[in-house]
């Protein structure tokens, strides 16, 4: 028989660095879940994305057990990685501090597709490019659909 | 004690949360919870830098206008609820791990009392069980043991109960250090020296047995160092990683001349015992 779901907790945590402090501690501890068990599992499963902010959706059950799904990193994080920008531009619309190529935007869009409400890579790319603009990151070259 | 944290409530268009979260990740913020009006961000109080936050607010004033409010979250044992109700566990029919509020069961050879206080190591996790099961195969009489990333101290405590007479256990977390000291006392352990730190702070010495239940990345970094602490013919038991990581771990150990004696898995978690 399937276990009865008691609720969900949605967090964003750095890969490999979950610890029992807030918000993980209070969010899981108040429900009687074993926080240390979650941290051990999360850290082991995210070793390859050490230090990268990862959304995680935790499902907890009436018997105090839980499981969780780690989603893809937010587009903003992937853009930062791709552009090697430490901080966004102070004036995003005028002074650009980093850039990514459309190929990189496509890679990010494809990485994010499973978690986005987009039906095509092109619409996902437009979403990622919009995020880049808001962060002051230039997308260099012509968009593939303008060629 | 655990750290004091600051909880910062950010109010902004939730569609733009990820941009600010990405920036905060660079400023030492550890984790985030989305809300209907933005998100909550968490940072150790001694890392909190109000000036950096004001800079961020200015930087994004045109594209992502935001407001924030800060409150302090005092340290406490967040795992208390689970710890109040945990069930004792048994390993290989010989060891029973229980809290101090459980009655002892004399039918087990080894009775371990662990009150974890937000530290890892009660035997409920597969990796702890796997390492303990391996320990039961080793002759500990009069031996020296190093427990790396000791958590509650459970592995060192079992090692002493198995006969080890010179033990060192350490953990990077302050609360785990205090908890290991408490658990050693509750279990009448006399030979375990506990300190807070990492392998880099460990006094030079040679051990018959080194135990390390941590994680893949730390193990890959530190296995060569563990090897330096190991006597020739000594045993290294590692765990805290998944089956899929076994090849990398074994390869790293082979580079320093450690030979696999046995390996075990349970629910995709793995442990490997090496000999020097």
Image: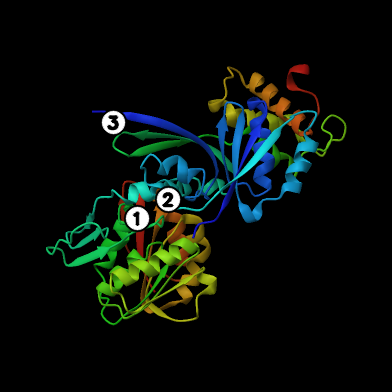
Which residue in the rendered view is the most extreme toward the right? A94
- Using the rendered image of the protein, determine whether residue B211 is visible from the camera's viewpoint: no
Q: Chain of mark 3?
A: A
Q: Are marks 1 and 2 in contact (CB under 8 Å)?
A: yes
Q: Check the picture and name the quadrant holding the C terminus of chain B.
A: bottom left
* Alpha carbons under labels 3 and 1: distance apart: 24 Å
Label 3 secondary element: loop
Residue A3 - label:
3
Q: Is residue B82 left or right of residue A8?
A: left
Identify whether A60 is placed above or below A34: above
Colouring used for the render:
rainbow
Near mark 3 (Cα within 10 A), the count class, few <14, some 14-19 or many ≥20, is few
Q: Quadrant location of residue B92?
A: bottom left
- Residue B238 visible to the viewer: yes
The residue that disc 2 covers is A40
Label 2 CA crowd tier, 10 Å (few <14, some 14–19, many 20+): many
Please, is residue A77 above or below residue B204 in the view?
Answer: above
Report the mark closest to the observer, 3 or 1.
3
In the picture, residue B168 is in which quadrant?
bottom left
Q: Is residue B222 shown left or right of residue B183? A: right
Q: Is tag 2's residue or tag 3's residue first in the polypeptide sequence? A: 3
Task: Find the distance from the CA under tag 1 to the CA under tag 2.
Answer: 10 Å
Q: Is residue B150 left or right of residue A108?
A: left
Residue at 37% across, 46% down: A34
Q: Which residue is mark 1?
A: B127
Mark 2 and mark 3: Cα distance apart in space = 22 Å
Q: Nearer the viewer, residue A17 or B33?
A: B33
Q: Secondary structure at mark 1?
A: helix
């Amino acid at each position: 028989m399937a276990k009865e779901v008691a609720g969900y907790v949605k967090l964003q945590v750095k890969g490999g660095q979950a610890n029992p402090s807030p918000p993980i501690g209070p969010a899981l501890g108040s429900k009687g879940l074993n926080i240390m068990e979650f941290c051990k599992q999360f850290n082991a499963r995210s070793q390859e994305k050490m230090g990268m902010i990862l959304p995680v959706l935790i499902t907890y059950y009436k018997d105090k057990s839980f499981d969780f799904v780690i989603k893809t990193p937010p587009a903003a994080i992937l853009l930062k990685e791709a552009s090697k920008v430490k901080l966004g531009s102070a004036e995003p619309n005028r002074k650009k501090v980093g850039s990514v190529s459309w190929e990189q935007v496509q890679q990010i869009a494809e990485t994010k597709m499973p978690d986005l409400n987009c039906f095509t890579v092109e619409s996902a790319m437009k979403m990622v490019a919009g995020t880049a603009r808001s962060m002051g990151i230039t997308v260099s070259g012509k968009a593939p659909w303008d060629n | 004690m655990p750290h004091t944290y600051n909880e910062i409530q950010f109010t902004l268009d939730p569609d733009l949360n990820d941009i600010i979260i990405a920036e905060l990740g660079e400023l030492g913020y550890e984790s985030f919870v989305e809300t209907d009006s933005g998100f909550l961000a968490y940072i150790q109080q001694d890392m909190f830098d109000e000036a950096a936050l004001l800079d961020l607010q200015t930087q994004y004033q045109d594209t992502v206008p935001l407001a924030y409010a800060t409150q302090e979250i005092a340290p406490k044992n967040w795992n208390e609820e689970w710890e109040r109700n945990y069930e004792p566990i048994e390993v290989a029919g010989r060891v029973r791990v229980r809290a101090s509020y459980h009655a002892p069961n004399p039918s087990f050879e080894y009775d371990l009392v662990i009150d974890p206080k937000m530290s890892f190591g009660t035997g409920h996790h597969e990796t702890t069980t796997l390492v303990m099961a391996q320990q039961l195969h080793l002759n500990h009489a009069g031996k020296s043991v190093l427990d790396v990333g000791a958590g509650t101290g459970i592995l060192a405590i079992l090692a002493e109960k198995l006969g080890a007479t010179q033990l060192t256990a350490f953990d990077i977390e302050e609360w785990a250090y205090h908890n290991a000291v408490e658990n050693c006392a509750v279990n009448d352990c006399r030979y375990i020296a506990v300190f807070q730190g990492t392998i880099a702070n460990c006094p030079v010495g040679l051990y018959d047995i080194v135990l390390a239940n941590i994680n893949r990345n730390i193990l890959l970094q530190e296995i060569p160092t563990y090897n330096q602490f190991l006597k020739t013919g000594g045993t290294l038991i590692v765990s805290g990683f998944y089956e899929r990581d076994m090849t990398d771990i074994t390869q790293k150990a082979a580079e320093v001349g450690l030979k696999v004696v046995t390996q075990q898995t349970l629910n995709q978690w793995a442990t490997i015992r090496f000999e020097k």
